[in-house]
Amino acid sequence: MKKLIAYLIMLVVIILTFIYRDEITNYVTNNIIKQEKQEELKYNDYARKQDYKYVSIANDLKINSKDEIKNIFYTILDSGIDSYSFYCDSDYKNCTKDVEHFFNDKDNLSEINNFVHPYNSFKNIKISVTNYGKITLNITHVYNKDEISVVNDQIDTFIKDNINDSMNNEEKIKAFHDYIINNTKFDTEIENSSDRLNSTSYTAYGLLINHKAICGGYTDTMAIYLDKINIPNLRISTNEHVWNLVYLNDKWLNLDVTWDDPVTSNGTDMLMYDYYLIDTNTLLNKDTTQHNFNKDIYLEAN
């Protein structure tokens, strides 16, 4: 008889829990989750904190609507933090589903990656989502501390030896454009490898230390340099290629160092300026295959 009563009580509890599940969820959210203090987002030295037309820095990291998800992800990635938790507002019923849907579309994250400093760009992201609206991102970055130190030393030395206050910004860009090309070979061996994104040739480290690179290495190296000399820039990409977009003389201009360093049949070095600080119309008149980017994302290039 006692066992029967216990089973009946358990059954009643289960039924009540099912009937009032929304009320229970809201209670836990409002009285437990909300009591957990939102961690302050700390920015590292490479955070740009820059608003663009496609993404902007979020002032509030609690998600109140679907439209805010993109900016919150961008803000967290831009900060350079390794791990961070944020929350859904209890009134936003589909929040966790919308966040997971956004996260699972890898193109969303890859595009956002192009708006942050290369040192803060991710190599891998893992997400955990609770039923009560707590979302945690664990981020593995492309560059580790040792690689950042080496790359900074190389570029800082170049700036010290080659750049001075009498030069205008275009002259500063040209000097480093030429330096990259004159000291780098395009890595044809890794170009079509399925593991190319994990190769050092896809990073500034590979370009500056091994003097071999594919488009990611050329682009990251230039982006890091441009940030150091305070010239606004972002990376712009298609499925096949990535290059720099640079703000110079009140215009956004394309700079493709990779395509200015062509692979020759006899192995001789060539220094070109075909893709050097050109507007988008000029770029697309030259090539509409690898440079045909998404104009709804890279709005500055339009």
Image (cartoon, helix red, strand yellow):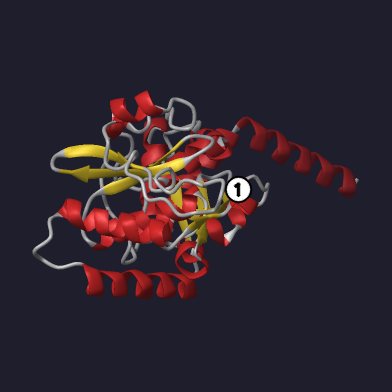
Where residue 69 appears, x then y in whole percent?
42, 38
Above/below status of 175 relative to 287: below
Indicate the quadrant containing the N terminus: top left, top right, bottom left or bottom right: top right
Would you say residue 173 is visible in this rendering?
A: yes
Crowding around mark 1 (Cα neighbors within 10 Å: few <14, some 14 to 19, many 20+) is some
> Which one is in front, 171 or 248?
171
| Picture layout, residue 193 above or below residue 172 | above
Which residue is at 25% across, 69% downward?
159
Residue 280 position, x and y percent, is 30, 29
How many discs mark residues in the rendered view? Answer: 1
Task: Write down the residue under mark 1.
Answer: 191
Farthest residue, direction front: 266
Q: Residue at x 18, y 55 (%)?
A: 171
Q: Quadrant of the C terminus?
A: top left
Q: Residue at x 60, y 48 (%)?
A: 191
Q: Nearer the viewer, residue 21 or 109?
A: 109
Percent x, y of residue 138 = 54, 58
Instruction: Describe residue 260's horizontal placement relative to residue 225 as left or right.
Output: right
Q: Is 81 in front, or is 181?
A: 181
Is residue 32 in view?
Answer: no
Asked which secondary structure carries label 1, the reply is helix
Image-quadrant location for residue 252: top left
Considering every residue shown, the one lying at the far left of the view is 166
Left or right of residue 129: residue 1: right
* Vertical order, 2 against 111 (above or below): below
Residue 50: x and y in percent read 26, 48
For the residue marked with disc 1, what is the amino acid? Glu
83 vs 278, left or right, is right
